[in-house]
Image (spheres, rainbow, N blue to C red):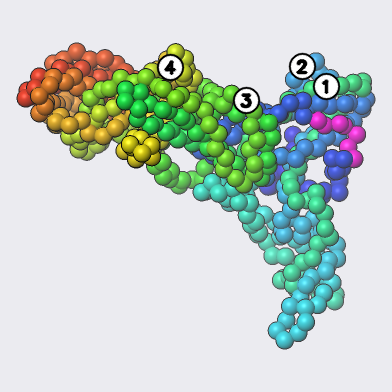
C-alpha cells in the first residue's frame, strides 16, 4: 500500500491521476455516510460506494476531507465475494505552494516580481530543485496543525530551493510563483487501482479517520413545580474540509484523539466527562439523533434531541463534598492520584438541592444521554425565564439516572475531614479514612444522600463504615442518612485501595 509517506515522494503528480468525471469506474454513494465522532477531535467515516467494474484494471478516485488521516484508510469488498482486488492506494494532498513547486520541478514557471518604484512584471525561471516537506514531530501522519485541533493545513519546507534565471542558479525565488489554474488541485484525493477478473457491479465499503470533528451536548431544564421542561442540544463542529450530507451520526466517549497528539501535549480541562470509570468506559458508539443530518464544513450546527415537555423528577438533598475534575483525571491519569496525599482534602460544605431524573422510555427519554452542561431556568409570573444555575451532568445509560442541581438546600450543612491516610508502596495499597458531619437546621426532617467519589483507583473496598451504603458507580458510593430537625449526625468510613 502506498499512502505517500514523507520519506518517499510526498506530492504525487496529479496529471497521473484521472479526474473523477473521466474515470471508467462509476463511483456513487450507496447511501449517506455513517460518522462516529470520538472525543479528542477525531471522527470515523464509513461510506458505501457502488462500483461498475470492468475486466482488468479499474482506477478509482475519491475526494476525502482535507484533515483525513491517510494511514487509516480501508477499502474492501463489503460482500466479501472478491469481485475486485486492491493493488494500489495513493493519497494526494491538496495543493500548497511547496507542493506545486515540487510538482513542477524541472519545469519553467512565471514569477510575479514586485520592485520598489516599478510596475509588477513577470519573470520566467526554471525550478531546478523544489523544497521538501519534513515531519513536524516523530510519528506524525501529515504536516497538519493538530496541536490545538484548529484544522488548519500548514506548509513546511526543508532544503534550499534552486532556481535557474538566465542560465544562473540562485537559492531564492525571484518572486511570487504563478501556477496554471487546476481546480481539482484544491482538494486532496484518494486514488486506487483495482483489478477484476470479470465485469460487474460491486459494493465497496470505505472507512477512514479524520481530524476536525468534535461534539458537545448542552441541556436545558425549565422548572415547572414538581416537573421539568427538558431538552437536549447536540453541537457538531466540522473542520474537516468536507461537507457531510444525509449523515447518520453516532457519538462515543472514547478519547481517540490521544493517539494523534504531539509529544508534550497538555489537555485543557473542559469540565466535561463522567463521574466514574464505568461511565468513561461506556465507549460503545450510541445514537442521540433519530435520523440523518447534514453537517456543513467549517461550521458548528446544533441538533435537538430528548425533548420532554413534562419530565417527572424526585427532589433530593445531595452532599458531594469532593469531586475530581474529569479533565484533570484525563490529563494526569488515574495512577497519579493513588499516592497524592493533597488531593481530596479540601471539601465543600454545601448540601445541594437536586432533581433526580430516570432515563426511561416511560418518562419520555430512554436513550443513552451524553454528558454535558445543563442550564436550569425558572419561569417567572410574566412567562419569561430566569436563570437559576448550571452544572455538569454525566453520561447516563438507558434506564440510568442523572441529577440536576437547583442550588443549596436551605438550612442543611455538611463537613468532611480526612482522619487518616496510609500508603504502602511495596505492598501496593493505600488506606484512607473520613469523618462526615451532617446538620439539619430546619424544622422538618430531611434525608441527606452523601456521595463519596473513590477516585484513587478502580480496585477498592470499604473496610469500615458506620452506616450502610450503596454503590452508585464504578468509583462512587452513597450513604442515605435521615436527620431530624435541629439534629447533627456523624458518619465515618475507611476505604482500602490496591493496585
Q: Which type of secondary structure does the marked residue at label 3 adopt?
A: loop
Q: Is residue 23 magenta?
A: yes
Q: Residue at x 18, y 19 (%)?
A: 447
Q: Nearer the viewer, mark 2 or mark 4?
A: 4
Closer to the eye: label 2 or 3? 3
Q: Which residue is mark 2?
A: 79
Residue drawn at point x = 55 percent, y = 49 percent? 150
Mark 4 neighbour density, 10 Å: few (under 14) some (14–19) many (20 or more):
some
Badge 1 element: strand
Q: Quadrant of the N terminus?
A: top right
Find residue 363 and name its label. Answer: 4
Q: Residue 191, which numbered label?
A: none
User: What percent of the width, then of the height, locates residue 184?
Assistant: 80, 49
Cβ–Cβ below 8 Å for labels 1 and 2? Answer: yes
Q: Are marks 2 and 4 in contact (CB under 8 Å)?
A: no
Q: Which residue is mark 1?
A: 202
Tell me if residue 387 comes above or below residue 80 in the rendering. below
91 relative to 498 in the view: left or right: right
Q: CA distance from mark 2 to mark 3?
A: 25 Å
Residue stretch in magenta: 22-28
Is residue 317 highlighted in magenta? no
Residue at 59%, 34% in the rendered image: 43
Q: Sequence order check: which comes first, mark 1 or mark 2?
A: 2
Q: Position of residue 49 (x, y in %)?
A: 78, 28
Quarter of the image for residue 320 reads top left
The reply to whether callout 1 and callout 3 are in contact (CB within 8 Å) is no
* SS at mark 4 in the image: helix
Residue at 60% x, 51% y: name it. Answer: 152
Provide the residue designation for mark 3. Answer: 291
Nearest to viewer (mark 1 / mark 3): 3
Amino acid at each position: 500500500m502506498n499512502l505517500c509517506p514523507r520519506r518517499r515522494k510526498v506530492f504525487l503528480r496529479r496529471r497521473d491521476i484521472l479526474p473523477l468525471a473521466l474515470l471508467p469506474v462509476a463511483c456513487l454513494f450507496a447511501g449517506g455516510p455513517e460518522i462516529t465522532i470520538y472525543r479528542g477531535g477525531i471522527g470515523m467515516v464509513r461510506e458505501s460506494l457502488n462500483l461498475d467494474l470492468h475486466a482488468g484494471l479499474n482506477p478509482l478516485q475519491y475526494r476525502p476531507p482535507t484533515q483525513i488521516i491517510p494511514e487509516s484508510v480501508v477499502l474492501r469488498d463489503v460482500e466479501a465475494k472478491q469481485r475486485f482486488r486492491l493493488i494500489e492506494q495513493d493519497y494526494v494532498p491538496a495543493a500548497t505552494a511547496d507542493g506545486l513547486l515540487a510538482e513542477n520541478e524541472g519545469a519553467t514557471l512565471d514569477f510575479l516580481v514586485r520592485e520598489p518604484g516599478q510596475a509588477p512584471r513577470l519573470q520566467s525561471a526554471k525550478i531546478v530543485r523544489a523544497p521538501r516537506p519534513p515531519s513536524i514531530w516523530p510519528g506524525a501522519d501529515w504536516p497538519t496543525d493538530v496541536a490545538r485541533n484548529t484544522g488548519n493545513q500548514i506548509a513546511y519546507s526543508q532544503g534550499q530551493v534552486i532556481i535557474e534565471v538566465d542560465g544562473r542558479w540562485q537559492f531564492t525565488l525571484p518572486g511570487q510563483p504563478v501556477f496554471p489554474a487546476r481546480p481539482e488541485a484544491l482538494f486532496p484525493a484518494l486514488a486506487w487501482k483495482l483489478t477484476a477478473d470479470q465485469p460487474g457491479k460491486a459494493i465497496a465499503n470505505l472507512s477512514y479517520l479524520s481530524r476536525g470533528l468534535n461534539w458537545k451536548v448542552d441541556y436545558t431544564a425549565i422548572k415547572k413545580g414538581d416537573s421539568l421542561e427538558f431538552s437536549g442540544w447536540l453541537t457538531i463542529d466540522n473542520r474537516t474540509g468536507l461537507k457531510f450530507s444525509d449523515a447518520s451520526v453516532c457519538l462515543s466517549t472514547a478519547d481517540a484523539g490521544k493517539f494523534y497528539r504531539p509529544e508534550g501535549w497538555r489537555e485543557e480541562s473542559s469540565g466535561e466527562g463522567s463521574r466514574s470509570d464505568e461511565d468513561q468506559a461506556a465507549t460503545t458508539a450510541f445514537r442521540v439523533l433519530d435520523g440523518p443530518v447534514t453537517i456543513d464544513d467549517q461550521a458548528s450546527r446544533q441538533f435537538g434531541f430528548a425533548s420532554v415537555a413534562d419530565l417527572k423528577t424526585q427532589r433530593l438533598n445531595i452532599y458531594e463534598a469532593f469531586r475530581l475534575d474529569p479533565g484533570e483525571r484525563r490529563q494526569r491519569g488515574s495512577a497519579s492520584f493513588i499516592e497524592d496525599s493533597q488531593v481530596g482534602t479540601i471539601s465543600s460544605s454545601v448540601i445541594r438541592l437536586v432533581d433526580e431524573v430516570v432515563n426511561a422510555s416511560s418518562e419520555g427519554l430512554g436513550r443513552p444521554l451524553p454528558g454535558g452542561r445543563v442550564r436550569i431556568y425558572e419561569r417567572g409570573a410574566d412567562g419569561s425565564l430566569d436563570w437559576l444555575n448550571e452544572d455538569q451532568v454525566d453520561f447516563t445509560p438507558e434506564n440510568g439516572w442523572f441529577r440536576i442541581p437547583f442550588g443549596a438546600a436551605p438550612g442543611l450543612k455538611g463537613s468532611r475531614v480526612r482522619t487518616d491516610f496510609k500508603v504502602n508502596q511495596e505492598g501496593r495499597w493505600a488506606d484512607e479514612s473520613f469523618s462526615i458531619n451532617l446538620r439539619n437546621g430546619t424544622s422538618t426532617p430531611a434525608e441527606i444522600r452523601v456521595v463519596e467519589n473513590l477516585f484513587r483507583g478502580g480496585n477498592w473496598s470499604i473496610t469500615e463504615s458506620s452506616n450502610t451504603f450503596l454503590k452508585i458507580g464504578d468509583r462512587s458510593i452513597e450513604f442515605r442518612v435521615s436527620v431530624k430537625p435541629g439534629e447533627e449526625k456523624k458518619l465515618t468510613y475507611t476505604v482500602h485501595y490496591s493496585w
